[in-house]
């Protein structure tokens, strides 16, 4: 079984590698993976041609739609976001949709944001909350590529923290009252 251990950055893919990837796509040799699988760094999967392969990546950010993986011999495979069950949230106006995004974000729900809709993995409690807010929900099948967050930077998508040191000096004042 082939084991893919590296993720290639789009900017690092050569013209030759791009040709290989395009010919693989035309032949149906790529991976369709749902969001839950794309969050993991180690797993087995099957290509569209039913070839079993392994993925053993360093712990980094979620594998994105269109990401290219390589094995130690230089073989490549492209990952595509698979359609999966989602809840689509729409509203009568953009302000209500923003309120829905706020409430879902406040619950740290992985959320895909589109110009006229929000998408999240099915959760009947969240659906009921959104309906009470006057939003419209419906079950759909679509690729899921949620927002990565504001702090995705050079830390590979890992938790981001700020270290602030604060100096609190006290001034003791004594007052003499005669």
Image: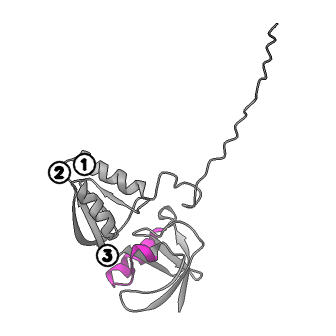
Residue 80 lies, with reference to residue 104, above or below; the image says below
Mark 1 and mark 3: span between their CA atoms? Answer: 25 Å
Q: Which residue is mark 3?
A: 84
Circles 1 and 2, Cβ within 8 Å, touching? The answer is: yes
* Residue 81 located left or right of residue 70: left
Which mark is in front, 3 or 2? 2
* Residue 141 located left or right of residue 72: left
Q: Which residue is mark 1?
A: 96
* Residue 17 located left or right of residue 81: right
User: Which stretch did the figure color magenta?
Assistant: 14-37
Mark 3 and mark 2: span between their CA atoms? Answer: 25 Å
Q: Which residue is mark 2?
A: 92
Give the class, few, some or many, for how many residues have Cα within 10 Å of label 1's Cα (few <14, many ≥20): some
* Residue 76 is one of the magenta-drawn residues: no
Indicate the position of residue 35 as horizontal and vertical percent values: 41, 72
Q: Earlier in the sequence, mark 1 or mark 3?
A: 3
Determine the residue positioned at 49% across, 88% down: 53
Give the class, few, some or many, for how many residues have Cα within 10 Å of label 2's Cα (few <14, many ≥20): few
């Amino acid at each position: 079984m082939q084991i893919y251990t590296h993720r290639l950055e789009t900017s690092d893919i050569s013209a030759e590698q791009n040709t290989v990837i395009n010919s693989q796509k035309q032949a149906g040799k790529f991976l369709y993976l749902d969001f839950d699988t794309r969050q993991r760094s180690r797993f087995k999967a099957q290509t569209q041609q039913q070839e079993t392969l392994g993925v053993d990546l360093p712990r980094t950010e979620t594998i994105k739609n269109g990401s290219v993986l390589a094995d130690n011999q230089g073989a490549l495979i492209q990952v595509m976001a698979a359609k999966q069950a989602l809840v689509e949230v729409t509203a009568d106006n953009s302000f209500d949709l923003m309120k829905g995004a706020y409430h879902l974000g406040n619950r740290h729900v992985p959320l895909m944001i589109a110009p006229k809709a929000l998408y999240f993995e099915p959760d009947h409690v969240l659906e009921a909350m959104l309906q009470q807010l006057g939003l419209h929900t419906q079950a759909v099948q679509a690729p899921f590529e949620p927002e990565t967050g504001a702090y995705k930077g050079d830390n590979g998508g890992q938790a981001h923290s700020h270290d602030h040191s604060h100096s609190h000096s006290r001034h003791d004042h004594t007052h003499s009252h005669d």
